[in-house]
Image: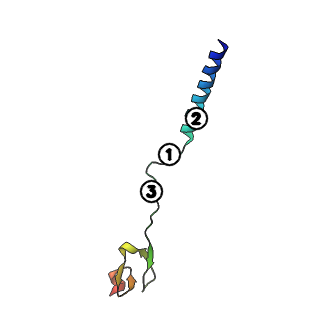
Amino acid sequence: MGIVKLIIVVLVVWLGFSVWRKLRQPKNNNVPQPSSTKMVSCSVCKTHVPENEAIIKDGQVFCSTKCLG
């Protein structure tokens, strides 16, 4: 009977440790991922804007139509 008790104790300890580790892991629900969008500087006002939102004309970068015109 001694070996059976030892196996039960080992299993209970292992189960407790597994549950404890699972509960200590941080939850990463809805964590925003960093953007990999390249930022560019406006040729007029030097404001940085995402490249996909910038206006590019004649090789120059503009942040808005105000700086463009």
- Residue 7 position within the rendered picture, expressed as x and y whole percent measured from the top left: 62, 21
| Vertical position of residue 1 compared to residue 9: above or below | above
- Helix, strand or loop status at disc 2: helix
The foreground one among 63 and 2 is: 2
Bin the neighbour count of mark 3 within 10 Å (Cα to Cα): few under 14, some 14-19, many 20 and up: few
Q: Is residue 53 left or right of residue 3?
A: left
- Helix, strand or loop status at disc 3: loop
Looking at this view, name the residue that lies furthest to the front.
3
Residue drawn at point x = 54 percent, y = 38 percent = 22
The foreground one among 47 and 34 is: 34
Which of the image's four quarters has the N terminus? top right
Amino acid carrying mark 1 in the image: Lys
Q: Say whether disc 2 or disc 1 marks the residue closer to the N-terminus.
A: 2
What whole-number distance in Å separates the C-alpha atoms at marks 1 and 3? 13 Å
Amino acid carrying mark 3 in the image: Pro
What whole-number distance in Å separates the C-alpha atoms at marks 2 and 3? 27 Å
Q: Which residue is mark 1?
A: 27
State the mark number for residue 20. 2
Bin the neighbour count of mark 1 within 10 Å (Cα to Cα): few under 14, some 14-19, many 20 and up: few
Q: Which residue is mark 3?
A: 32
Which of the image's four quarters has the C terminus? bottom left
Q: Is residue 45 left or right of residue 8?
A: left
In terms of image quadrants, where is residue 18? top right
Colouring mode (rainbow / by chain / secondary structure / one colour): rainbow
